[in-house]
Amino acid sequence: MNWIQQPWPWYVAGPLIALVMILLLMLDKKMGMSSNLRTLCAICGAGKTTSFFRFNWKAQRWNLVVALGMILGGFIGGNLLSEDPTVHIASNAITEDLKEMGFSDVGNAYAPDKLYADNVFNDPIMLLILVVGGLLVGFGARYAGGCTSGHAISGLSDLQLPSLIAVIGFFIGGLLMVHFIFPLIF
Amino acid sequence: MRTVIYLGVGILFGIVLFKSEAASWFRIYEMFQFGSFHMYGIIGSAVVIGSVFIQFAKKGKITSFSGNKINMVPKERGFYRYLLGGIIFGLGWALAGACPGPLFVLAGAGYLPIVIVIIASILGTFLYGLLKDKLPH
């Protein structure tokens, strides 16, 4: 059972993610995690402001239950199924780049302390980075009509051209961020 | 009963995203540096298997558990919303190191600052709702 405690290789994870998508289709639903953000807006009363949030969110409760399961899955994966959750980056060049940018815990952590340790609550700049990151993710996902699960996995599996355009967009944005904006902010 | 099944599917998805390190900021950075095949292998193999299933489903050879036809709703036609929205999403994915699925996973794994990203992503969704009619789609 030792392999469970190790990081799972792509050829285990990819097929299991396909299984998740297939199970949801078999349950007459479709995979899409960012839809939950819209549902949460609606629950918080955003429908009073804009018609975009005036929909029957109760029909989306199943997806909130999936999200709740993901929180539990994160707890199980992080605390019960990982003796040592450290992420090992194979490339020395990338490791050195990250250290130079101040991510000194690369190779010793799952998420960088610089952004995800509790002391960021005392660091206004890192807090701002997390806020901007979240705003972009939420805004962009809804503008594009889906995120990694809805477009990159589900949409590409259905050979949807809009999803291909969106995924190309994801990569343009991600490449711009790490190659041009990271050197300015880290 | 169905609720328990959805919860189980979510738990499976959450465990897979954590254990495959797809929820790790470092892996996302590495992906955008083309430093490893790992993330491409995950997405690529999921898409290959998923598309085989969907092809069979579309030919009506597979029906859902309740006996219905498996319905793939085609995405609306458009260009700007997918490209521009995609770029904005990609900027955030690389910066926060997490897309919407991993937001929930990291919260469960106990990384408290992810709550800031989750709240901001809900606000970002709200902002889109406000500006929707002014944006090119």
Image: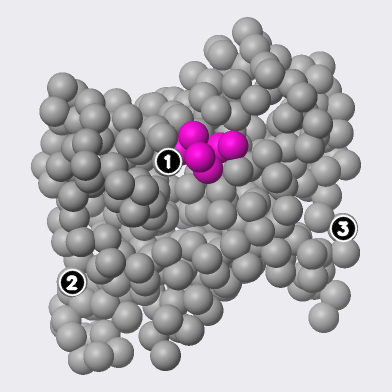
Does residue B63 show up?
Answer: yes
Residue located beneath label 1 in the image: B122
Q: What's under tag 1, amino acid-wise?
A: Ile
Quadrant containing the C terminus of chain B is top left
* Residue at the image position 32 percent from the left and 80 percent from the top: A27
Q: Is residue A29 above or below residue B63?
A: above
- Tell me, for residue A84, which label it has, or none: 3
Instruction: Indicate the amino acid at tag 2.
Output: Asn
Do the CB atoms of the residues marked 1 and 3 lie less than 8 Å apart? no
Badge 2 vs badge 3, beta-carbon distance below 8 Å: no
Q: Of A53 and B5, which appears nearest the observer?
A: A53
Q: Locate residue A23: give its quadrant.
A: bottom left
Give the residue number, with chain letter if any, for mark 2: B71
Task: Calculate the distance from the C-alpha at mark 2 to the C-alpha at mark 3.
Answer: 41 Å
Query: What residue is drawn where x is 21% and y is 91%?
Result: B67
Looking at the picture, how far across and down is residue B8, in whole percent? Answer: 53, 79
Q: In the image, what residue occupies the spot 32% across and 81% down?
A: A26
Do the residues marked 1 and 3 share a common chain?
no
- Separation of marks 1 and 3 at Cα, in angstroms: 31 Å
Which one is nearer the viewer's eye here, A120 or A29?
A120
Measure how far apart labels 2 and 1 are at the Cα level: 28 Å
Query: Magenta part of the protein: which range?
Result: B116-121
